[in-house]
Image: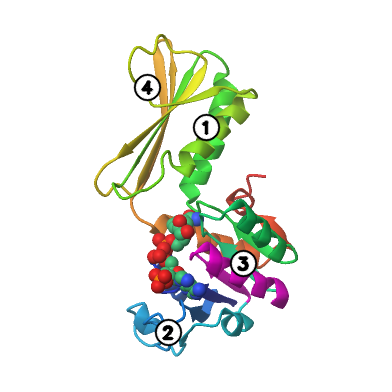
Amino acid sequence: MIRVVVQGVAGRMGSLMGRLVLQEDDMALVGATERPEHSAVGKDVGEVLGVGKVGIEVEEDIREAAREGDVVVAFTTPQATLEAAEVCGELGKAMVVGTTGFTDGQLEEFKRSVSRVPCVFSPNFSVGVNLLFKVAQEVVEVLKEGYDVEIIEAHHRFKKDAPSGTAKRLAEAVLRGLGRELRVVHGREGVVGERGEEIGIHAVRAGDIVGEHIVMFGGMGERLELVHRASSREAFARGAVRAIRFVVKAGPGLYDMWDVLGFR
Ligand code: NAP
């Protein structure tokens, strides 16, 4: 039985992770934390998750909660994740981390803290998106020259950054497949002239779109498109569940979803 501790269990991703872990036959939710002073602290985690009592209290101290587990899952804030990483490094606990938005300094500190434990760290745990990175690279390796690559991403109106991190990673995958550098153009306006040697990235923002990515390969007489659509956050949580199974068997080191999915 894999003993899982979820940090930030009342959050959007944390609560999904908590519910999924409770459903998995080979996993037990043995600990959960929330921000000090959060209304969930002291409550039964099952009640916080809306599934009825499970006999585990939401704690505010990640050190206490982590002692009980084999792996700590963090989809929280960079600061909270750094605290968890320090504790896991000290106690020798594995980690699955999906938190984004680290500064370069925080990222260095995070990597130092988890250097002696197994840790899967990924900005996108969706299996489909990680497969898209791989397939996009392979498509370019086959098509080689003569196809124009355009990446179109669409997200909800509340998203603060553009283009998405996933769109940037897709451009990197395309460049890796080509084996050479190309200019990346963000949108086009005015008399831009004929298309040059470039990759175009376009960001759509509308309504409640969870996340869509299209990689378009435009050739003479044909067009190939790879499309990924996320319809809920469950795709990220289900990928993180696969990462939990991977990380408890892995040796110390930093891994990502490509390792989990066996792409390396
Ligand atoms: P969220 O709903 O705000 O959840 C974060 C939770 O962590 C909140 O409940 C927050 O409490 C709690 N928290 C803050 N400080 C804490 C502390 N010291 N100890 C314990 N809990 C603490 O955010 P979300 O949408 O779930 O996203 C969380 C992170 O995951 C973000 O960085 C997001 O970008 C990332 N994310 C990654 C993926 C992926 O696939 N890698 C997918 C989705 C999201 P308060 O609300 O009270 O502060």
Front-most of residues 6 and 244? 6
Query: Which image quarter: residue 205?
Result: top left
Foreground: disc 3 or disc 4? 4
Three-letter residue code for mark 1:
Ala
The answer for how far apart the CA atoms under marks 2 and 1 are is 42 Å
**Color style of the picture:** rainbow
Foreground: disc 2 or disc 1? 2
Q: Is mark 1 within 8 Å of ligand 1?
A: no
Three-letter residue code for mark 2:
Val
How many circles with numbers are drawn on the protein?
A: 4
Q: Is mark 3 within 8 Å of ligand 1?
A: no
- 47 relative position to 198: left or right: left
Using a 10 Å C-alpha cutoff, classify the residue at mark 3 as few (fewer than 14 neighbours), some (14 to 19) or many (20 or more). Answer: many
What residue range appears in magenta?
70-91
Label 2, on which residue?
A: 41
Residue located at (52% from left, 32% from top) = 171
Label 1, on which residue?
A: 171
Where is residue 252 shown, x and y percent of the image? 74, 63
Say which mark, if any, is on residue 95: 3
Foreground: disc 1 or disc 4? 4
Three-letter residue code for mark 3:
Met
Q: Secondary structure at mark 4?
A: loop
